[in-house]
Image: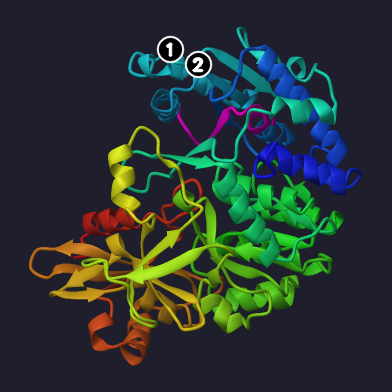
Amino acid sequence: MSKDTLGRVLIDAVNSNPDGDAVVHHRRGVRLSYAEFSSQVVAAAQGLSARGVSVGQHVALWGENTPEWLVAQFALATLGAVWIPVDPGYGPADLAYLVGNAETETIILQKKFFDVLRQARDGSETRQSMAPLQRIVTWDDGPTPEGTIDWPEILAGSETAAALDAAGDNVRPGDVTSIMYTSGTTGRPKGVMVNHESLIMKSRGTAERQRLTGADRMVLTVPLFHMFGNTCIVVSGVIAAAALIMPDDAFDPGTALEAMEAERCSAVHGTPNMMIAMMNEPSFAGRDLSALRTGAVGGAPCPLEVMNKIIDQMGAREVTIAYGITEASSWVTMTQPDDPPELRVSTIGTPLPGVEIKIVDPATEAEQPPGRPGEICTRPGLMVGYYRMSGLTKRVIDRDGWFHTGDLGTKDGQGYVRITGRIKDVITRDGAEIFPAEIEDVLYRLAGVGEVQVFGVDHDTRGQIVAAWVKLAPGSALTGEEVLDYCRANLPPGQVPDRVAFVDDFPTTRSGKVQKYKLSEMAKQEGAD
């Protein structure tokens, strides 16, 4: 079996660190060494195979952060089945769409979600979409729902590394291993097909950039249904034979800090708002986090003040900023561990090993020289394509194999990339283009601003106007006029917002991405034009 399959990656980890912790669930009290984790993967692969799960079959995986999720992920990858992560926040209609669109034959789910599945199967509007589903496997405590297979029955197989090796004989690096559905910030989610080879290429580069080894202990608070969790942390961690520490089934800042202290975690990963939540937790000041060294912040811009706190107060002195996209099989760029904090927050780093980046004019696709803005394009290590959407795939991956991300940015002479915004987020006011990220960067420097989102609101005569919605830092008493005065003093006149509003929170996808189109709709309804 090629080294570029997830099954082989696990075998390598077992061979290098058999007695080291592989998976720890702090609240549940579960602790599995790499040898024990591999044994469960072998048993699950054999149990699933015996019940009809085979190479190429589509299997939905629906649950929160538990050890069973990870065992199932690697068991399915070992068999050559295609694992499809399901958002724990899905309702019946969402689930039915995914099952039907992905032609899902098997679902493995945490028992707490079974009622939603039942509603989807019984609903008059969703029943037909659920028709491909043939078998249901459930895990966790509680009675086993009728007509389902309980997880312990699946694990009743042989437990040898040789069996794991044999089970994956027909799995090839280029085979699709997962279909990950985008978060659907605009319209229906799209199924992104990713293969073993690309996931491993990106994860190996991530592990190298963060200097991960078998001595590292990585706190896993990011949801497993998202690529940030199941690939950027999990696959990178297994490549390094590091320990994956789950504080709880879902993110809670207090429990996360408790687990980080108890398990001597050396790596912390998350979005900026997750980091802020942990540092604002009342118990933070009393926690011993001296083992922290590295990690990655991604998913949104990280203000310099937050980065400095992660380094100085958390102690993660080598923490990196990362930029990724599902269609590019996880991270694309990452800062260096030794970069100064200012560089870590002002750029998204340099391409991972083996990754290419170019900046092109969105209109002509001509490559831009260093420093000139354009659309960020990348290759290789890309998705195989969108499932059942070949036409759309051809529109985003050009004939030379470049994926057009839709993100705008620049690249300097040293290869550092800066994000200036999304093509779809560019605001056109009075005929002039305005990039929200440039305004946000300035506003993050204003004391009292906790989080800010700048976006366009449709206007009858000006095209759009510029709105800035601000979430204040704890204890801040900033006024809207003070924010506007700061903008007038620090921004060109053509970038000053028309309106400032204060909010308690922002609408996000369940993976934590702010939905700017919803902000625009809300502002329009509130008469912000």
Residue 54 versus residue 294 in the image, above or below: above
- From this viewpoint, which residue is outermost toward the bottom? 489
Q: Secondary structure at mark 2?
A: helix
Residue, disc 1: 122
**x 25%, y 71%: residue:** 466
- Write down the region rendered in magenta: 75-91
Q: On the picture, is 386 further left or further right than 197?
A: left
Disc 1 residue crowd, few under 14, some 14–19, many 20+, Cα 10 Å: some
Residue, disc 2: 118
Residue 329 versus residue 157 in the image, above or below: below
- The dot on residue 335 is none
Q: Quadrant of residue 519?
A: bottom left
Measured as percent of width and height from the top left, residue 514 is found at 42, 56
Tell whether label 2 touches label 1 (CB within 8 Å). Answer: yes
Q: Which quadrant does the C terminus fall into? A: bottom left
Query: What amino acid does circle 2 point to?
Result: Arg
Query: What amino acid does circle 1 point to?
Result: Asp
- Coloring scheme used: rainbow
Residue 519 versus residue 80 in the image, above or below: below
Q: Which quadrant does the N terminus fall into? A: top right
Measured as percent of width and height from the top left, residue 99 is found at 45, 24
**x 31%, y 88%: residue:** 488
Between 512 and 158, the residue placed more toward the observer is 158
Distance between the Cα atoms at labels 1 and 2? 6 Å
- From this viewpoint, which residue is outermost toward the top? 147
Measured as percent of width and height from the top left, residue 323 is found at 51, 63
